[in-house]
Every structure is written in C-alpha cells, then in structure tokens.
Image: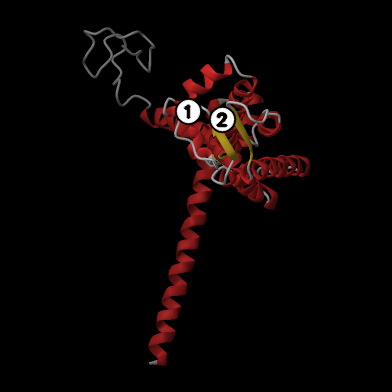
Amino acid sequence: MADCPKCSHHLRLTDWKQKCPYCGANIVMYNLQERLMQDADKAEVEYYYHQKKVDRVKASFIGSPLAVVRIFTSLLPAGALFLPMLKDVFLKFNVNFPEKATIINIYNLITGGGITSVVNTAESSQAGKIFLAGLILLMVSVLLLIIHFAFLTLACSPRGKVRNYTVSIIMLVFASAYAVLMFFIPENDIVSASVGIGSLLYVLLLAVNLVVEVMVFRKGIEVKHAQCYVGGIPIEEYFEMQKNGVPQEELRAEMYRRLTALQEEKERELDQKLDKIKTTSQEAAENE
C-alpha cells in the first residue's frame, strides 16, 4: 500500500477509507494541486530526455546535406547485390545454380540445402574451401550492411562515430576479401567461379560509403535540440535552480509566475488575432 501524503504513515490493506486513520487527512484531496504539479514536472523532464534522443535521430538522417547523401550511399550497395555477383559458375554436384548468380541465387543455394554439398566438397577440395569462405564473407558483409543502416539512427550518439566506422570498415574488408578469394579459385576443379560486375560494383559502393562516412564525421553534425520547459521554466534553468538548492516553495512560485505570464501572452495574441479578423470583416462589409 501507499503512504499518507500528510503524516507519511504506511497504510495497510484494511485502511481503505478516504481519510487517513492516523491524522484524519483526506488522502485523495490532500495537497492535490502540488502533487499534480510534481507529476507534471516529472513528465516534462522525461519528455526532455526523450526529445533529446529524437533530435539526435533526426540530425543523424537530415542534420546536414552530407548526412542526407549518406542515406543513399548506405543503400546503394544493396542494389549491386541484384546484379551478377558470380559468373562462369560450375559446381560438380547436383545443385541447381546458374552460371551468373545474384545474391538471390546465393541465398537460395544456402537455404535450399545446396550449401551442404559445398561444405562436403570443401573437405576434400581447395577450390571448395575458397568458394565456401567467399560465400561466408559475402553473406556476413550483407548482414553488416543491414546493421549499418540501422546504426545510422545512432550516428549522433556518444559512440556513434566509432560504431559506424567499425561496421563500414569491416563491411568493406569482408566484401573485398570475398572478391579476392573468388579470383584464386583454381580452374578446372570440381568448383569454379569468377567475380561478376555486381561484386566489383558492390565493393566500389562500399568504399564510397566509407568515404562519405568519414566526410560526415569530419565536418560534424550540429544537433539542434528543441527547447523544453518545466512549469514554464526553460529546463536548463530548472536544472540549474535544483542544483543550487532553490527551495521547492520558491521554485513553485516562479513556475506559477511564468505560467501566468505565458497564459497572458497567449491571451494577448488571441485578442490580436480576433481584432484582425474583426477589422478584416468590417472592411469586407464596407467594400460590399
């Protein structure tokens, strides 16, 4: 159970009546205005911390022209995956695999059970080992491509720079290693293949993405935070007043003063709008 808001006695399950059995205060109505204000203060502080996260996500995507360009350079490598990644593919086992393979064909090979044949071949063939290692590196780089795009939302967070650099570099290294391995597959073996235009373009676009990533972080992105208030007081000033130990009564009095001033300002603006509408209506009536 809760405590009495006046005498702070702990209430038992049997203390179900509206009045406190110890001091007689009305538990529901006692100091209700202040308690509502305290709840409002907590809600506005929580909103401030949430708004900061929203502002950082917004800046990560559209905080600068380069940040907008980074969105496209992060997505373009995915388009290259649908071009032929491998060409002149030859697999000497019963697997339905085209001579020119895109990422979809490679995915079907893995999910369709053909990867088992590749693994079995890799145990006895150097070409099979190279082919299997290349496929693993390619698929890991594709997975990192998805993770990298998700990490763009955290680019303006404290560790955003290190995180994005790490993923971008690993992506490029794995994709490059995949392309290099495919060049070293021995010819006339039970497995043979060579890199297609999609692989070369994929590596190139990943390199472009890394360059843009570096440019974005070097230039920097200014995160513009929306102004938040607690009881009409700018939240930075509110935190400073709390830090300086301003009494709660004085803090609340300042809130009421500022809230009253804000209300009066809104009423003046509303009166001005109404006067303008009235004047416009009168002028329209006179012109008729």
Marks 2 and 1 close (CB-CB < 8 Å): yes
Asked whether the viewer can see residue 258, the reply is yes
- Given residues 201 and 165, the one toward you in this image is 201
| Quadrant position of the N terminus in the picture | top left
Disc 1 secondary structure class: helix
Q: Residue at x 47, y 73 (%)?
A: 276
Residue where numbered disc 2 is placed = 139
User: Quarter holding the C terminus?
Assistant: bottom left
| Label 1, residues with CA under 10 Å away: few <14, some 14-19, many ≥20 | some
Nearest to the eye among marks 2 and 1: give it: 1
Q: Quadrant of residue 271?
A: bottom left
Q: How far is the residue under mark 2 from the one under mark 1? A: 10 Å
Is 86 in front, or is 71? 86
User: In this image, 171 relative to 31: left or right?
Assistant: right
Residue type at mark 2 is: Met
Q: Secondary structure at mark 2?
A: helix
Is 203 on the left-hand or right-hand side of 119? Answer: right
Q: Where's residue 222, x and y in %? A: 70, 44
Locate residue 187: give its quadrant.
top right
Q: Looking at numbered disc 1 in the image, what kind of residue is underneath it?
A: Ile
Q: How many marks?
A: 2
Determine the residue positioned at 52% across, 55% down: 265
Of residue 170 and residue 87, the one placed in the foreground of this image is 87
Q: Can you tell which mark lies on residue 110?
A: 1
Badge 2 local density, few (<14 within 10 Å), some, or many (20+)? some
List x then y, in percent, for residue 113: 43, 25
Residue 170 in sight in this render: no
